[in-house]
Image (cartoon, rainbow, N blue to C red):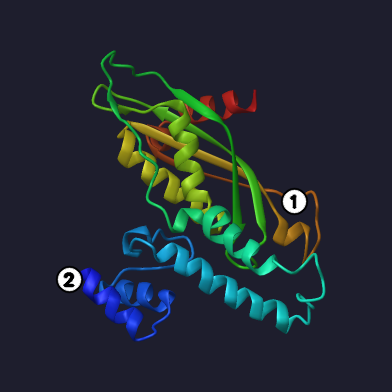
């Protein structure tokens, strides 16, 4: 039935972005800049979306009065930018979460673990300027917690961050995802990042950084545990 609808949409000449948006709206699903919409994209549509974004980016370059026909450096820029957005910088919007194998806490570990610093890259939702930073994750497991491989923390962080984000919301999204996967007694996520919307434009302050954190469970309730986490990552 879905394939039949897809053929009808294509026959009607509906752009692929409009088809995806229609599905989202019909389902009442949110599609903000930092939302994942992979579940609403059908097989083959990412290639169509790449073509559509390339065409629209070409229009942006033309409106900026850039001679993409005569300038050999800009000739294929529209498609390069479209690929960068869809497959890299904003890729976390369009692909499902990376597979993560969860293991039972057979040894009944109950001491704090810290993972980091994890290098993360994102883009500011306001100006689409780069956000480059580091993330530390603290986990206080219990005997019912799931354990995941160390590399999986980096993969999940990268999936969340590779979308247009504001840092305050990004750390909350990452904390919620890790809480769901690991189910610990306590969880801490701290992020420190450079924002090029401040360094490259606007006030052009090269030294300003943003640091924020999310504390859940025992990290939120136990001030001594929280201090230990901050002390250890400072080392």
Residue visible at 82% across and 75% down?
Answer: 70
Tell me where residue 146 appears, x and y as whole percent. Answer: 29, 28
Q: Residue furthest left?
A: 1
Tell me where residue 69 appears, x and y as whole percent. Answer: 76, 76
Question: Can residue 163 be seen?
Answer: no
- Identify which residue, 231 or 96, lies in the foreground: 96
Residue visible at 45% across and 58% down?
Answer: 93
Helix, strand or loop under label 1? loop
Mark 2, residue position: 1
Question: Can residue 12 be seen?
Answer: yes
| Left or right, 133 with reference to 137 | right
Helix, strand or loop under label 2? loop
Label 2 neighbourhood size at 10 Å, few (<14), some (14-19), many (20+)?
few
Q: Quadrant of residue 192?
A: top right
Q: Quadrant of the N terminus?
A: bottom left
Q: Does residue 124 lie above or below 139 as drawn?
A: below
| Left or right, 174 with reference to 27 | right
Q: Earlier in the sequence, mark 1 or mark 2?
A: 2
Tell me where residue 194 appears, x and y as whole percent. Answer: 69, 49
């Amino acid at each position: 039935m879905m394939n039949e609808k897809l053929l009808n949409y294509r026959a009607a000449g509906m752009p692929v972005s409009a088809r995806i948006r229609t599905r989202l709206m019909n389902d009442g699903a949110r599609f903000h800049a930092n939302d994942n919409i992979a579940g609403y994209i059908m097989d083959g549509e990412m290639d169509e979306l790449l073509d559509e974004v390339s065409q629209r980016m070409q229009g942006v370059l033309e409106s900026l009065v850039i001679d993409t026909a005569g300038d050999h450096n800009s000739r294929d820029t529209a498609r390069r930018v479209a690929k960068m957005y869809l497959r890299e910088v904003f890729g976390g919007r369009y692909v499902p979460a990376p597979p993560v194998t969860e293991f039972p806490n057979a040894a009944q570990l109950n001491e704090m673990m810290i993972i980091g610093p994890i290098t993360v890259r994102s883009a500011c939702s306001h100006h689409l300027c780069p956000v480059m930073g580091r993330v530390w994750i603290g986990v206080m497991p219990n005997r019912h917690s799931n354990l995941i491989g160390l590399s999986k923390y980096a993969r999940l962080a990268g999936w969340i961050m590779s979308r247009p984000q504001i840092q305050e919301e990004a750390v909350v999204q990452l904390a919620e995802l890790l809480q769901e996967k690991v189910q610990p007694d306590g969880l801490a996520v701290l992020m420190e990042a450079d924002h090029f919307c401040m360094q490259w434009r606007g006030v052009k302050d090269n030294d300003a950084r943003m640091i924020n954190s999310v504390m859940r469970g025992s990290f939120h309730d136990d001030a001594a545990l929280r201090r230990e986490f901050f002390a250890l990552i400072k080392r």
